[in-house]
Image: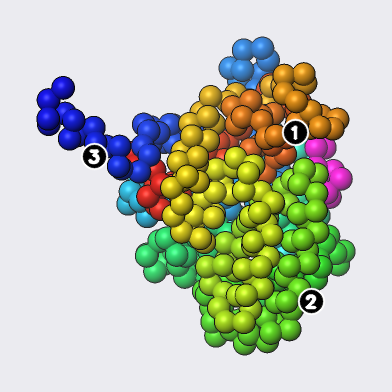
Amino acid sequence: MSIRNLFVITVLALLPPAFGAEADALAIESNILARHLPYGTILDPILSLPDLSQIVDYTRCGDSAIWTGHYLAAEAFRYQVTGSTDAMTNINNAISAIDNLINVTGNGVLARCALPADSPYAASISSQESANGIYTGTAYGAPWIWVGNTSRDQYIGVFFGLYVTYDMVSDQTVRNWCSYEITRLLQNLLNNAWNIVLPDNTVSTTFLIRPDQQLSLLLIGKHVNGGAFEGKYSSLSNEISPTVVVPVGVDCADQTSSYYKFNLDYLTFYALKRMGSGWSSLWYDAGYDILRSTTSGHENAHFNMIDRAVSGANQGRDADTVSYLEAWLQRPRTDVYRDFTGQFPACSTNEACQPLPVQDRVTTDFLWQRDPFALSGGGEGDIETAGIDYILPYWMGRYYGVITD
């Protein structure tokens, strides 16, 4: 081997982990545009069996808002890394779709999902989401239907996407738009005493039981519109920041059931840890330490990237993150049923003793919010995942230097 080649190999070994993944990320994003945004927000197509050649329906409308927020965040990180005009177009379209989720309800509350009343999928989605309530509204001058019973996770996902975009995109029009959407969503919650109130005056859920989430949303509000929310955040943080550790501790008491709670916790601390200061930040640090000590061994690329954002570089964690994303690319892209019972040591019914390898975990919509210990799960193999669980940690990894491409 020549001295020159030895020098090149040595230098490459010292660089951050790299793999040829940008093409994979861009292919996923192209597929999202072609198949997962029929009405502006994220939906997952149901494909014809057995050939998967035709879109026959759409599903997962009830979580459209949260994944649209995650998609928006991914595109914002992509734009910051690449300056892509395509990413900017996707950002504007996603914010417009979120705007529509607020407008269509008529009272400033966020809809889970919305689509034209004359959509060929309207009857099916209305049936799928009947338990959440189907409401009528107007969008773009035409009748639309929207899904109610809006949950806290839909709000947290949307706030996350808008907050990331506000920070990643320097275009003032985009930043103003993010500030506007955050302001009216947050003001609506404050006007209703932290309750999510639907147009028929029913309360779908409340943030009153989550001081951590209240403070996170207020910090985001203060960040984008200090004149409206700085005073409210300051007074509330003095009152309730010591209680932040309580709901997080409850979540962490059980590390497998309702695993999506940990995604919400990480999004919450993404704001608290990055922007919290003073006495309150001591409690944010304590709450985050509980969360991280519970989940750091779960081999979760998304959680690792949030930790990179709030805690800084860590060579071992960052190398692991790259390997988890490489493993993600080996996973099925539809919800095929998978059963690994007997293949990994089990410590309880359908629960392995250790997290399954990323490539072997059950299929789902967003991998990193699903129980990594589950031995079996999935569907009939006809629902296609959007892949936001790949592109979000990937573009975050590019931004933070965890991944070079």
Taking 189 as reference, is 394 above or below it? above
Residue 51: where, in percent of width, then height? 62, 12
Residue visible at 75% across and 38% down in the picture = 125
* Residue annotated with mark 3: 11
Say left or right for 260 vs 399: right
The amino acid sitting under disc 1 is: Cys
> How far apart are the alpha carbons under marks 1 and 3?
39 Å
* Residue annotated with mark 1: 353
Q: Tell which of 374 and 129 is nearer to you.
A: 374
The amino acid sitting under disc 3 is: Val
Secondary structure category for the residue under label 3: helix
Q: Which is more foreground, mark 3 or mark 2?
A: 3
Say left or right for 161 vs 253: left
Taking 372 as reference, is 138 above or below it? below
Say left or right for 192 vs 280: right
Residue visible at 62% across and 48% down in the picture = 296
* Residue annotated with mark 2: 193
